[in-house]
Amino acid sequence: MNRMLVTVCCAAIALGVMALVSCTEVPEPVTPSYTTTLAATEIKNSAFEEFFPIHYQTFLENNDDSQMTEYSGSIPHEKHLCEDPPKGWKYCQPYLKNLWMGYPFSYEYNRARGHTYALHDVLEIDRINRYSEQAGLPSTCYNCKTPKMVEWIPKYGDDFWIMEFNQFREELDLDDHTIGCATCHDPQTMDLRITSVPLDEALKRQGKDWREASRNEMRSLVCAQCHVEYYFQDKKFGAAAKPIFPWDLGKDPEDMYEYYKDHGSTTREGFEGHFIDWTHAVSDTPMIKIQHPEYEMWYDSPHGAAGVACADCHMNYRRLDGKKKISSHRWTSPLKSAEMIKSACGQCHADKSPEYLKERVVFSQQKVWGQLLAAQDISVKAHEAVRLASEYQGYKRPDFDQLMINARERIRKGQMFWDWVSAENSAGFHNPAKALETLSRSIQYSQQAVDYAMQATNYGIAQNLEGDIKDIVPPITEHSRKLQQSQEHLDSHEWLGYLPLLPEADLIWDLNRRVQ
């Protein structure tokens, strides 16, 4: 009996110890400490290769622009074209040029390539006016394209944001000054850091300091420097064109829609004080352009809520020299190979095959994509309904003006919610529930816009909105700054006729070089 009692007691003690161990919090991983001989102000990517050759090797893999996943990937193409690469992709959004009518995004909107192409792509894209000395956009556009920001902001302060974009072209080295090491790392210690002024200030407004963040938090916050929604500040509120993250009321679409209601200076009736990115040329609606809210989509997702960092999935661990395990600095989708799925997703889902995991991702994306296209179509219909109503010559309701204000407000909100998912680069997978809810609301708001416009005309325009939207308003497949210099082009589509004819002009800038 005594021997049995001792055995039972020992077993109980062992179980107790095991329970205590299992309940003990796993310590925060400690980042290895480094000491380089680089200057604290070093920003050139090539300067880091000597100290971290293996990491640098993976960084250069971002140059690979030859592979797509099911819905995304790296092959550069125009996102509105449903063609085979290199022009388009099978999952396209044919109405992008229609929905952004009158805004530079309607000139060109391409699949984003790797971060090593960031400067190349922003200097070449038609959204920046290369036919003029004046770019038409401020230097704010460099904020997420280059670590030169580390030099420019101390030099120019808040005056930098509104400065002319084109004046900085010739300072840039397309390889050494693209997004890279110094964007996220202190050159001397390699500690993760935040170089983004708007993120630093957004966190301060929330009472947070990234310098006190855990290592795991930093492995997402460095991505939040750019993979977020932001806007260019109205000068009424501070430094003109300064990038601001609209997080003060929360990070969801409804929160940001409310935020934008009082961060502008327009006096337009019904939209007093609203922030406006541009006014849609066809429906005359004050619009909001959403950027790429990956961080806002992720933070309360199943993965985000569980503490899975951006780097866990997009910087999978690799062994390249037979010994050291490193975080890959090829920032890309893990769906590009079974090996990447194993090293990224397999850390938590070890009991599932790469094929199964990929199928589950694509399953979620298929559901979201169908609703994304539905929201796109009804948004186009809403713009057309308001266009028809504003030009209607028949009987109009006594409250016509208020109904039209209501219609335009719903267009604004519906398209913003569609764009929230459209601009987010995961086809909804980063947060399927939020993506589907956001698109559901988008469809409701856009349909309300159609209803208000029809009510305003006592349903006089209803017959003009019957049928397939692609028959009512064909997608615009071609449009650019050069084409807008042609009256024949503007006459080729009814919606294009609402744009002004641009003066004839030749190309002045080719990437970071002046051609004339």
Image (spheres, rainbow, N blue to C red):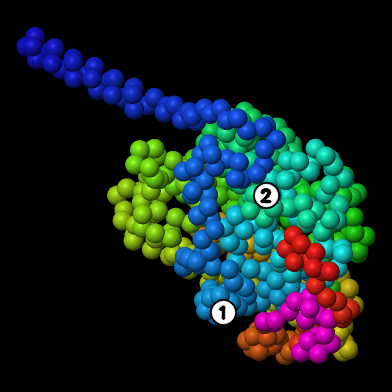
- Residue at 31 percent across and 53 percent down: it is 352
Residue identified by numbered label 2 = 177
Q: From the image, which quarter does the N terminus lie in?
A: top left
Which quadrant would residue 181 be assigned to in this image? top right
Q: From the image, which quarter does the C terminus lie in?
A: bottom right
Is 491 covered by the magenta stretch?
Answer: yes
Q: Is residue 168 left or right of residue 73?
A: right
Q: What span is colored magenta in the figure?
A: 476-492
Could you tell me residue 221's position as x and y percent?
A: 60, 41
Q: Which disc number belongs to residue 94?
A: none
Is 179 located above or below residue 443 in the figure? above
Structural crowding at the residue carrying mark 1, measured as other residues with C-alpha within 10 Å and reported as few (<14), some (14–19) or many (≥20): some
Could you tell me residue 412's position as x and y percent?
A: 76, 66
Q: Is residue 41 left or right of residue 4?
A: right
- Residue at 78 percent across and 87 percent down: it is 489
Could you tell me residue 447's position as x and y percent?
A: 68, 73
Asked whether the viewer can see residue 441, the reply is no
Element class at badge 1: loop
| In this rendering, the label closer to the viewer, 1 or 2 | 2
Asked whether the viewer can see residue 85, the reply is yes
Is 52 covered by the magenta stretch?
Answer: no
Could you tell me residue 502's position as x and y percent?
A: 87, 78
Residue identified by numbered label 1 = 82
- Residue at 34 percent across and 22 percent down: it is 20
Structural crowding at the residue carrying mark 2, measured as other residues with C-alpha within 10 Å and reported as few (<14), some (14–19) or many (≥20): many
Number of marks in picture = 2
Is 53 located above or below residue 266 in the figure? above
Q: Looking at this view, is 325 or 73 the one in front?
A: 325
Q: Amino acid at mark 1?
A: Cys
Q: Amino acid at mark 2?
A: His
